[in-house]
Amino acid sequence: MVALAASGVVTVRVSARHGHVAGEQLSGFVWIGSGALVLLAGAVLVLGVLDDRGARAEGLAMFALFTYAIYLLAAWGILHVAARRQAQRFR
């Protein structure tokens, strides 16, 4: 999960240098989501060490990964719709 968070941040930073990012808003979404994913990764590690029973840590990890994916998809959708609406206003 930490690797996924880091790859998201690196992708946004590299894309920003080449002008491929739709603005600083998307970068902000990725930074916030990556920070939350790293915190959840820490919680997964602590829960995995302290919990004697089954798959609570694994369940939390899957929840975190899917939530991160949905969060980024929603962020992209919001920014995409906002950009289209702004473009229509200036026509």
Image (cartoon, rainbow, N blue to C red):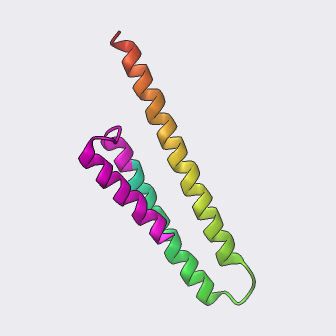
Residue shown at 55% from the left, 83% from the top? 46
Residue shown at 72% from the left, 78% from the top? 55
> Can you give x and y, in whole percent of width and height, for residue 12 in the image?
35, 52
Q: Nearer the viewer, residue 10 or 43?
A: 10
Q: Nearer the viewer, residue 74 or 10?
A: 10
Residue 23 belongs to magenta span: yes
Residue shown at 32% from the left, 48% from the top? 15
State which quadrant residue 19 falls in.
Answer: top left
Residue shown at 59% from the left, 56% from the top? 67
**Does 26 sit above or below residue 46?**
above
> Can you give x and y, in whole percent of width and height, for residue 3 in the image?
46, 69
Magenta span of residues:
1-28
> Can you give x and y, in whole percent of width and height, for residue 62 in the image?
64, 66
**Does 17 sit above or below residue 55?**
above
Single out the residue that lies furthest toward the left.
Answer: 17
Residue 33 belongs to magenta span: no
Count of numbered tags: 0
**Does 10 sit above or below residue 49?**
above
